[in-house]
Image (cartoon, rainbow, N blue to C red):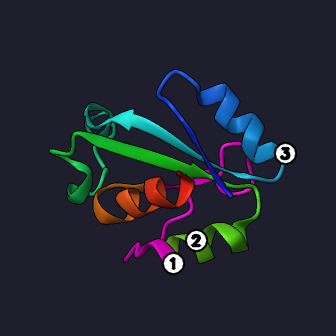
Amino acid sequence: MIRIFQERELLAAYACAAEGDQALHLMSGLYAYIRKDTPTCFKNRREIAHLFDQNKERLIATAKRLGVRVIRVEREGTASQHIDLCGKPLERARKEAS
């Protein structure tokens, strides 16, 4: 099950993932401009998100189910292991979590 966390609830999202669940951490699209290597598809978005999950296989399977075209697991093997979401995959994740 995916649980939703707002921008200021990052530590709670980490804790949720550590407990074995999936955490959808919503953020302002302005964060897409922090890193120079951010894919273009994330720029000019009102909202982006991290999907945290400590189970890499489940994380990848969820990304595929949500329709993520290029799956890149960020910070692999750490407490903040995640994939980035925007657009339609993010919309689908929000619906799945409700």
Query: With 39 as the anchor, is 53 left or right in this view?
Result: right
Q: Residues within 10 Å of mark 3 (few under 14, many from 20)?
A: few
Which residue does the image show at 76% across and 35% down from the upper left?
15
Q: Compare residues 93 and 79 and report the one nearer the observer.
A: 93
When asked about the image quadrant of residue 97, the answer is bottom right
Measured Cα–Cα span from mark 2 to mark 3? 17 Å
Q: Is residue 30 magenta?
A: no
Decide: marks 2, 1 in contact (CB < 8 A)?
A: yes
Q: Mark 1 falls on what kind of element?
A: helix
Classified by dominant secondary structure, the portion drawn in magenta counts as loop
Amino acid type, residue under disc 2 in the picture: Thr
Q: Mark 3 falls on what kind of element?
A: loop
Marking on residue 65: 1
Amino acid type, residue under disc 3 in the picture: Glu
Q: Quadrant of the N terminus?
A: bottom right
Marking on residue 19: 3
Measured Cα–Cα span from mark 1 to mark 3? 22 Å
Marking on residue 37: none
Q: Farthest residue in the left direction?
A: 44
Marking on residue 62: 2
**Disc on the earlier residue, 2 or 3:** 3
Question: Which span of residues is magenta-colored?
Answer: 64-84
Image location (x, y in percent) of residue 93: 47, 59
Q: Compare residues 32 and 24 and report the one nearer the observer.
A: 24
